[in-house]
């Protein structure tokens, strides 16, 4: 799971949320599974690393457990960020009243009201941008099964196909190079550990494709 708060602050140039209030130092930031030697390397939110061994053949169960844990932690972070945004909307009106009083002493009443309204419209923007990004990520993970189907369909459409046979034969021996999705994402499915490989624009496009796929499935 990426540090979406830090990423948002880099984009906006402002400290939208106090990271310590909405995260936990023991959370899983990312993990790497060594399937040959049967262990997983986990990097926690505070940067510390730890290694956990598992029995041969239990790599799938280990990944499912890690993905579920990351999702639970992600949901907690989103909930905490939403509370921060709500508290900001409660606290900031007092600041705006002081701003209004200042401008009313130096400018016209109508202009002061305009400034106040503009300020209220801008206040939630920095929170809403972060919340929208997190909501998009959450939707992708919640609809993982259908999203993975779209990823498989997109990748397989790029594979070489031998049309000389009576029945076309798809070549699965080589992974296509001209696709958005990594081979790991194709094989293991999209999750909070690899979703950062795609940017916001690509995730929106993936969501749109998935919704269309879901509508097609529902009509059948």
Image (cartoon, rainbow, N blue to C red):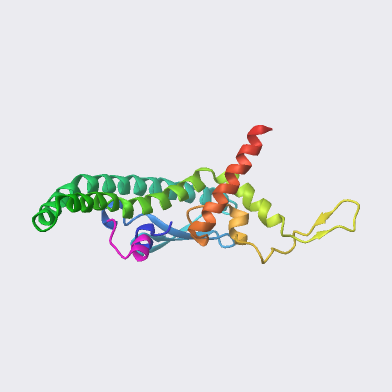
Residue lying furthest left: 105
Residue found 78% across the figure and 59% down from its top:
171
* Residue 190 seen by the camera: no
| Image spot of residue 80 (x, y percent) | 30, 47
* In the displayed structure image, the side of residue 29 where residue 203 appears, left or right: right
Name the residue nearer the viewer: 137 or 54: 137
- Is residue 24 or residue 134 the one in the foreground? 134
Residue 60 shows in the view: yes
Give the residue at x 41% y 45%: 72
Taking the image as shown, residue 17 lies to the left or right of residue 71, namely left
Task: Tell me the quadrant of the picture where the N terminus can be found.
Answer: bottom left
Give the image location of residue 123, x and y in percent. 27, 52
Q: Quadrant of the C terminus?
A: top right
Residue 79 placed where, x, y %? 34, 44
Q: Is residue 125 left or right of residue 134?
A: left
Total marks drawn?
A: 0
Q: Is residue 16 magenta?
A: yes
Residue, x 58% and y 57% (percent of image)?
Answer: 185
145 is higher (above) or lower (below) than 59 = above
- 3 or 158, which is in the foreground? 158
User: Quarter-wise, where is residue 178 in the image?
Assistant: bottom right
Q: Which residues are magenta?
A: 8-17
As for residue 146 lying within the magenta part, the answer is no
The spot of residue 36 in percent (x, y) is 59, 62
């Amino acid at each position: 799971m990426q540090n979406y708060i830090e990423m948002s602050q880099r984009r906006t140039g402002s400290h939208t949320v106090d990271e310590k209030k909405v995260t936990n130092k023991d959370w899983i930031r990312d993990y790497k599974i060594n399937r040959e030697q049967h262990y997983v390397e986990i990097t926690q939110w505070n940067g510390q690393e730890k290694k956990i061994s598992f029995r041969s053949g239990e790599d799938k169960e280990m990944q499912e457990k890690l993905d579920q844990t990351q999702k639970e932690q992600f949901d907690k972070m989103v909930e905490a960020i939403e509370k921060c945004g709500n508290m900001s909307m409660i606290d900031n009106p007092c600041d705006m009243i002081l701003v209004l009083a200042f401008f009313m002493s130096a400018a016209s009443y109508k202009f002061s009201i305009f400034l106040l309204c503009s300020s209220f419209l801008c206040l939630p923007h920095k929170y809403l941008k972060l919340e929208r990004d997190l909501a998009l990520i959450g939707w992708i993970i919640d609809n993982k099964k259908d999203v993975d189907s779209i990823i498989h369909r997109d990748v397989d459409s790029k594979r070489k196909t031998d049309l000389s046979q009576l029945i076309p034969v798809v070549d699965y021996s080589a992974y296509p190079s001209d696709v958005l999705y990594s081979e790991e994402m194709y094989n293991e499915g999209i999750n909070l550990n690899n979703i950062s490989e795609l940017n916001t624009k690509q995730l929106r496009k993936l969501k749109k494709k998935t919704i269309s796929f879901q509508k097609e499935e529902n009509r059948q």
